Image (cartoon, grey):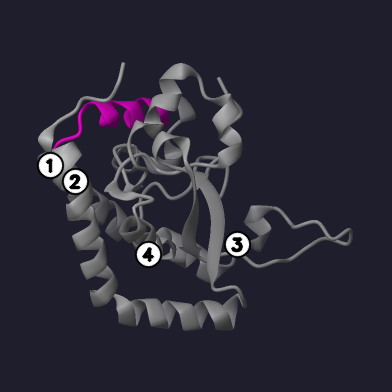
Amino acid sequence: MKAKKNIYKNYIKRPMDFLLSLLAIIILSPVFVIIGILVKIKLGSPIIYKQKRPGLNEKIFTLFKFRTMTDERDGKGNLLPDGMRLTKFGKFLRSTSLDELPELFNIVRGDMGIVGPRPLLVQYLPLYNEHQRRRHEVRPGLTGLAQINGRNTLTWKDKFEYDVKYVDTITFFGDIIIILKTLKKVIIREGISSNSAPTMEPFTGN
């Protein structure tokens, strides 16, 4: 089953995402500068963390985020676990979602939308079943249905269910509601960590 097609999804959503994200970049440019300086001082270079992620139709793109972890390594040269490299400043950036601001440039470029399933790791692609893979029928988003319903506290099963539900129910008013609820979640800093990890446990397949 393919995602439902509608006027908003096909003709309005992408231009709206482009204009709103471009406007946000202009308005928030002082915030970008301040965070960039603080990241440089507290965490070093590079300021921007880049990682390959699958997008629309599983096309791979480079995701941009502000760096939140150090490069601390053990005696053998291996990176320490995420929880040990995630500093207090990094936790602050994540809890406020400020680390995700550079993704606005991904939206301008067309890699992402404002609302959609969050882009996950490339190594998860072979692990998806047919139903889970449907999350790639739309552009990944800065926020999504799963993010307003638990974010990293959700199980992977529930997260994928919300992702596919969004694919099948895209509407203008639905996106507006998700954006407004996301702002509320960010303000109260809810759902940042899972119940047993600083972020989210790795997906190992169902």
Using residue 26 as the reference point, say whether residue 206 is left or right of it: right
What residue is shown at x 46% (from left), y 36% (from top)?
58
- Secondary structure beneath label 4: loop
Q: Amino acid at mark 1?
A: Phe
Residue type pointed to by label 4: Leu
- Extreme residue in the right direction: 76
Asked whether the residues under the numbered discs 2 and 1 touch, taking CB atoms below 8 Å apart as contact, a structural biologist would say yes
Badge 1 density bin: few <14, some 14–19, many ≥20, Cα 10 Å: few
Residue 98 image position (x, y, % from top left): 39, 65
N-terminal-most mark, 3 or 4: 3
Q: Which quarter of the figure is the N terminus placed in?
A: top left
Residue 13 is situated, as x and y percent measured from the top left of the image, at 19, 46
Query: Between marks 2 and 1, how big is the CA–CA gap?
Result: 8 Å
* Viewer-nearest residue: 28 or 193: 28
Residue position for label 4: 101
Compare residues 122 and 175 and report the one nearer the observer.
Answer: 122
Q: CA distance from mark 4 to mark 2?
A: 20 Å
Specify the segment rendered in magenta: 159-172
Query: Looking at this view, is 109 or 125 the one in front?
Result: 109
Residue type indicated by callout 3: Leu
